[in-house]
Image (spheres, grey):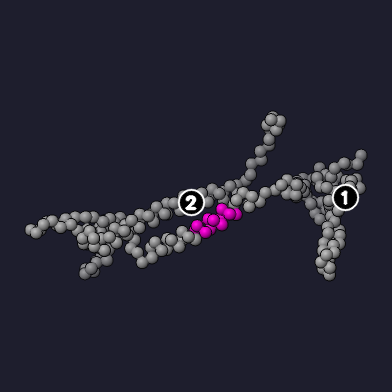
Amino acid sequence: MPRKKCGFGFSCAAMMLQPGLEPKDCPNYEPCGSAAELTPEEEVELIRVREVQRQEAQQQWERIQERIRVSRHWAAVTMLMERGCSQSLEDFGVVDSLASMEMRLQELRSRAEQFTQCCYVAPDNCEAHRYNVKRPSGTYWYNKLTSREAIFEPEEKEEKVKVIHLSHDDDPRNTEGRLGIERRNRLHQLQTQLQIAEGALEQAIALLTEPLALVLADSENLDS
């Protein structure tokens, strides 16, 4: 008995550009009839008709017949892409989100460079301390930048030193030294946030690279 449907699930009429064409009358009837016996990746050769625009006349079209090799897997994907309302990255807002992230990253890079340009950034393991000196004329408050190790350039000595004197509270050396510590702390916080963002990106990449799990809907759920 002639098959009433294409073994690959194609529309014979659309495949051959012949409205109303039945599978039994299609040139692909025999190879399509063996589709059920093929593995998902095995290929057979089919005939397809397409309309192409003539080079010498932009408003005129002609039909050409060509041979193509298809598999059940390819046919399934093609059918779902054409009929299953397949979605794109734009439909999920992914393209806009990626564009926005690229812009924000450029802005972050620019701001990070400006943040450290011509500005003092204190190293780790160094802090500013306020101390007083008592003299006959009164008590005077000063500031210093200290480190556990000798990392600072000396003012006169040849060896590196552990302390840089920053003078009074309102002295630019003190204000800039303490701002340098705040800049350092913020850059550490920035690095922490970037590591969090990097982890989120790794998870996002994994979502697209890990094998997909096939989930078959339960018939009870379909009925409900």
Q: Name the foreground residue: 39 vs 129.
A: 129
Which residue range is magenta in the image?
A: 95-105
Q: Quadrant of residue 141?
A: bottom left
Which quadrant: the N terminus? top right
Few, some or many C-alpha atoms within 10 Å of disc 2 (few <14, some 14-19, many ≥20)? few
The residue lying at 70 percent from left, 48 percent from top is 86
Q: Which residue is mark 2?
A: 197
Contact, mark 1 vs mark 2 (Cβ under 8 Å):
no
Q: Position of residue 146 (x, y in %)?
A: 25, 58
Q: Which residue is mark 1?
A: 19
Whether residue 132 appears in magenta in the rendering, the answer is no
Specify the principal SS of the magenta part: helix
Amino acid type, callout 1: Pro
The quadrant holding residue 221 is top right
Q: Is residue 198 left or right of residue 221?
A: left
Residue at image x 89%, y 47%? 20
Tell me, yes or no, whether the highlighted magenta stretch contains residue 96.
yes
Eye-nearest disc, 1 or 2: 1
Instruction: Name the image quarter holding the C terminus.
Output: top right
9 to 17, vertically: above or below = above
Q: Identify the secondary structure beneath mark 1.
A: loop
- Closer to the chain start, of discs 1 and 2, is 1
- Image quarter for residue 142? bottom left
Residue 44 visible in the displayed image: yes
Give the percent coordinates (x, y) of residue 80: 74, 46
